[in-house]
C-alpha cells in the first residue's frame, strides 16, 4: 500500500480548495483531506460543497484508474447524486473511496462515499463520460 500524495493540480480549482491528497492502488483510488479553517461552514463543520468536490474528484479518479492507459483527457461528470449523512469538524481527516459499478464504451457508472473514521459523511452515485482512448 502506498502513501497518500498531493493531487498535483497546481493553479486549478482543486488547488484553490487545498489539502486534497490521493492514493492510487492497482485496484482502487482513495482520497483524503484534513479539514482546515477554509473548509468549514458557519457551523464549524466541513462545508457540503467541499464534500461534493471530494466525491466528484474521487469518483472521477476511480473511473480514470479503472480504464487504464491510453486515455486522451479525463472523465467528465455527467450526473452526480449524493446524500449528506454526517459532519466532520476542524482538524478531522475525511477519506473518499469509490468503485466502478458498470461501464459502456462511452459511460462509466460509479459509487462512493466520504468517511471520517468509522462515520459515513456522504454517499454518492455518478455517471461519467469516458475519455477517448488513443
Image (spheres, rainbow, N blue to C red):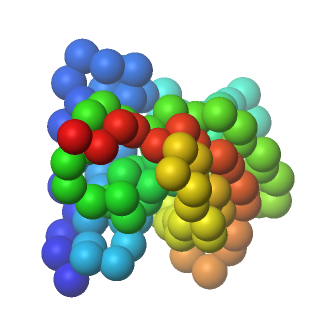
Image location of residue 86, percent across then percent down? 77, 59
**Which of 99 and 87 lies nearest the eye of the viewer?**
99
Examine the rendering and report whether any part of residue 58 can be seen. no
The N terminus appears in which quarter of the rendering?
bottom left
User: Which image quadrant for residue 48?
Assistant: top right
Examine the rendering and report whether any part of residue 30 can be seen. yes
Q: Is residue 101 left or right of residue 7?
A: right
**How many numbered marks have been drawn onto this rendered protein structure?**
0
The C terminus appears in which quarter of the rendering?
top left
Image location of residue 6, percent across then percent down? 21, 47
When the figure is inspected, residue 79 is found, relative to residue 22, above or below; the finding is: above
Q: Is residue 70 left or right of residue 129?
A: left
Image location of residue 74, percent across then percent down? 36, 36
Image location of residue 12, percent across then percent down? 31, 19
**Which of 91 and 26 lies nearest the eye of the viewer?**
26
Q: Is residue 66 left or right of residue 41?
A: left
When the figure is inspected, residue 129 is found, relative to residue 33, above or below; the finding is: above
Kindly identify the residue that appears in the image at 57 percent across and 56 percent down: 104
Kindly identify the residue that appears in the image at 39 percent across and 38 percent down: 131
Kindly identify the residue that appears in the image at 71 percent across and 41 percent down: 80
Q: Residue furthest top?
A: 11
User: Which image quadrant for residue 3?
Assistant: bottom left
**Which of 96 and 67 lies nearest the eye of the viewer?**
67
When the figure is inspected, residue 5 is found, relative to residue 27, above or below; the finding is: above
When the figure is inspected, residue 28 is found, relative to residue 86, above or below; the finding is: below
Kindly identify the residue that appears in the image at 68 percent across and 73 percent down: 119
User: Which image quadrant for residue 41?
Assistant: top right
Amino acid at each position: 500500500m502506498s502513501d497518500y500524495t498531493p493531487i498535483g493540480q497546481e493553479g486549478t480549482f482543486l488547488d484553490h480548495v487545498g489539502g486534497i491528497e490521493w492514493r492510487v492502488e492497482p485496484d482502487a483510488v482513495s482520497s483524503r483531506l484534513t479539514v482546515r479553517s477554509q473548509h468549514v461552514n458557519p457551523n464549524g463543520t466541513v462545508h457540503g460543497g467541499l464534500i461534493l468536490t471530494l466525491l466528484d474528484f474521487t469518483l472521477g479518479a476511480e473511473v480514470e484508474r479503472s480504464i487504464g492507459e491510453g486515455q486522451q483527457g479525463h472523465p467528465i461528470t455527467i450526473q452526480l447524486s449524493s446524500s449528506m449523512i454526517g459532519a466532520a469538524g476542524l482538524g478531522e481527516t475525511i477519506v473518499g473511496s469509490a468503485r466502478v459499478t458498470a461501464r459502456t464504451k462511452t459511460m462509466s457508472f460509479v459509487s462512493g462515499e466520504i468517511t471520517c473514521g468509522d462515520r459515513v459523511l456522504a454517499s454518492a452515485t455518478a455517471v461519467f463520460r469516458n475519455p477517448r482512448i488513443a
